Image (cartoon, rainbow, N blue to C red):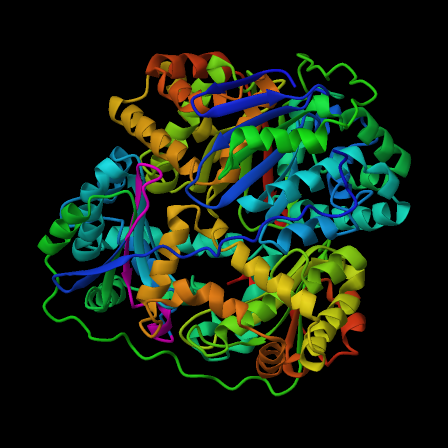
Amino acid sequence: MSLDRTRPPVSPPVEPFQFPEFEIASARGLDVYLLPRDTLPLVHLELALRYGADVEPPDRRGSATLTAALLAEGTAHRTSQEVAAAFEALGTEVRTNADWDGTYLETTLRSEHAATGADLLYELLAEATFPGEEVERLKRRRLADLRRRASRPDFLASREMLRALYPDHVYGESLLGSADDIERLASEDVVARAGRLRAAPLTLLVTGRFDRDELLARAAHWDRPRVVAETAAPPPQAVPEPERRRIVVVDRPQAQQTELRVGHQGLPRVHADRIASQVLNCVLGGKFTSRLNLSLRERLGVTYGAWSRFSARRGRGPFVAGAAVETEATGRAATEILAELERLRADPVPATELADAKSYLIGTFPYSLQALEGLAGRLEDLATHPDLPRETYREWPGAVAAVDGGALIRTARAHLHPERATVVAVGPAAVLEPQLSALAPVEVVAAADRQRP
Amino acid sequence: MSVSGTTTGLHRHRLDNGLRIVAQRDESLPLVAVNLWYHVGSKNERPGRTGLAHLFEHMLFQGSLHVGTNDHFGYLQQVGGVANGSTWYDRTNYHETVPSSYLELALWLESDRLGFLLPALTSEKLETQRTVVMNERRQRVDNQPYGRALEELHRILYPVGHPYSWPVIGTMEDIAAATLDDVRTFFATYYSPNNAVLSLVGDIDPEEAFTLTARYFEEIPVGRGLPPPPERSDEAGEGGRLILPDEVELSRVYMGWRVPAYGDEDWYSLDVLASAHSDGKTGPLYRDLVYERELAQDVSAMILPTELEALFLLVSTARPETEPERLEEALLDHLRSAAAATLPPVLFRSTRERMATAFLEGQESLDQRADLLSQHATYFDRPEGALEELDRYLGVQPDAVRAAAATHLTASPATVVVVPRERAA
């Protein structure tokens, strides 16, 4: 049989992929989400707390991530090194971190160690002691880390965007905090935060191969605090956005390229338009064949890659589009990004383009769930946002498929705002200013000012 | 059609044109990873045309006779496929993970660009990809703090003309100089079925997958003949210690040693050493330099899996108040200790435990599994080596680790120290 190469082979339709079933059990004041997958003798364990960085006091930014890191730096029974050794003896390590919405302690280990690992995780949460010397040690390291990051143009661009979009707001600084914040943080702040953290709603997430009854029995022995908050703190208040377009150039005279960002406030994690915004972003800048990448990379050749995303958090996280572009082409690239935002508001997305975006999102869903961490991430999302229905991820592919052209253009008009977007460019101001001044007045700040974090 | 066999779930097949195929069934998700390695990388380039293998990789995503420009990604993404490629010193890989019912689509695309690339190659496409690659180089190297350090380390570690002495992405001048003829010749020379391995892992029937592969690949002719593979030169490089001023706030030290190639017994011993010393917080490098003495912000030890010979690398960022010389001396002290005494038993045990877990975690991704199969099939013609690799690690004994350090890491390293520009002035 001769082969016809002129057209792609026709394949049978794909069975719709279903997010796996999981159980929600309860053990002495904590919820336990159990999602079995038997493929490999591995288990992922995670303690998720609905208490994140968005409840930090304004002059104590960075305390959420620092407190989370310090959970692994000593307990009533173990020093910092002994904590590390206990996990390493099980062939793993522990990660303790916070984002805007929650604080998480997690580890992936071989199934035979599941119960021991779970007890260790809980020991860190319940019995971390925050020794003064460990607080100071981690602060010194964090301060050096801020200096290291401040020489990265992409970090400078992202941080400048947050500061522009969220003046005097908790979202206006990176999760690491500023150097001033870190220097101000005292042991007492960490201990106080940990106290509130321990009383926050807690979920144990278990994915992989595990003995359900054994884990539930262990969790039932954990000594939970008597007073547990029913709900986490309310999400942060909205802040007014700039009414007009702003352009901020962070001057790096010696830069070889320009980090360009275009952004404004987006929408919260739980919102009626969330799924339509995911499809919209997929058309705009969520995949290789999205409009921004095809335009800036494949047509103009001025970047290695262009992207966009709506950050999902309890409050209105940022929408940002970005690319590292050839400095001489920055004006053209910024104009192009703004024009693509406008085009989505003005013209319906052609049916095939919309269908491609939806099938990409639906088709890559199982790919994103190959590792236990991918599965756990979805459970974490549900545990951290109690307003999300339990069926969210089972219904997600169908909800994506249901987004039509009308919903897309309504979403674009509601959530894309080129006319009041902020443009940030990190590069040589002398070359950038003349290119960008046609778009809006240009404010120039020196990178040196921004590098002393 | 010739050999077909099975080793612990692996199925092998070879087409008459020399294409080697490895298949492994895993039905846990309705996906298949398609992973194609060509045994050509930057080491096959010549000075003056560095970066050609990588620029070529970009051209392979620009369409072929039956696939339009950018349609490669288009076809795959519209069915929920995730695709990419990468270039390395010794090889170039192209891979996509697709819903398993689209295996044939992936084979159609991969065979079209191997069999029918040249009719679709235009100078316009080359010019666009040239500027894309120049921007990639700026983004990853020239505009990135510490971005040039590894290039400089390779340059001083190896003698002039050594196949590993130039960067995979190439120099800006060479990227600018590449011509359409260079690209055509490169393709005709190296992109031949007998210089490739195709690995398929996922929800497939291996025998059906072989039949399908044969349908798309067996008519593709063998190329013009492969030149003899590049050889390493054992001559010493310039070595020494190079200060590299950069737009950074913290100094960073890079030290490199030339060590036996990937696959050698000592390579595995040195990888165990690297893991024991720097992967965990109880590893001596981290505990001493980052935690106890706070000389360093971070430290890592690693060994690259390269074919002609390997590079053992120590990288450590200094704290603002640490003079790089002091950090360098401390790093060397650690290696001297590693060469003199065996690893403490507790550390040795936990290192083995971590390696076992990490190996299982590597099995979670179909594409990572397929990539490791391609790697072993390409370098050693033994894909089953991918499945045996954990045993090789677990077979390493503490004294072999010490001996490997003593044999390979006691000579003076080549060193690059990146320092803040104002400090260099």
In the figure, is residue A225 to the left or right of B339?
left
From this view, report whether residue B249 is shown above or below residue A388: above
Q: Quadrant of the rendered structure where residue B349 is? A: top left
Q: Which residue is drawn at 78% across and 69% down?
A: A331
In the figure, is residue B140 to the left or right of A295?
left
From this view, report whether residue B68 is shown above or below residue B258: below
From this view, report whether residue B134 is shown above or below residue A184: above
The magenta-colored residue range is A35-58
- Looking at the rendered image, the quarter that the N terminus of chain A falls into is top right
Residue A420: x %, y % from top left: 64, 83
Q: Which residue is drawn at 51% across and 44% down?
A: B31
Which one is nearer the viewer's eye here, A176 or A238? A238
- Report if residue B158 is visible in the image: yes
Asked if the magenta segment contains residue B375, the reply would be no
- Report if residue B179 is visible in the image: no
In the figure, is residue A89 to the left or right of B6?
left
In the figure, is residue B355 to the left or right of B194?
left
Residue A381: x %, y % from top left: 37, 64
Q: Quadrant of the rendered structure where residue A435 is? A: bottom right
- How many numbered callouts? 0
Which one is nearer the viewer's eye here, A116 or B371? B371
From this view, report whether residue A426 is shown above or below residue B205: below
Q: Which residue lies furthest to the front in this view?
A: A1
Residue A225: x %, y % from top left: 12, 65
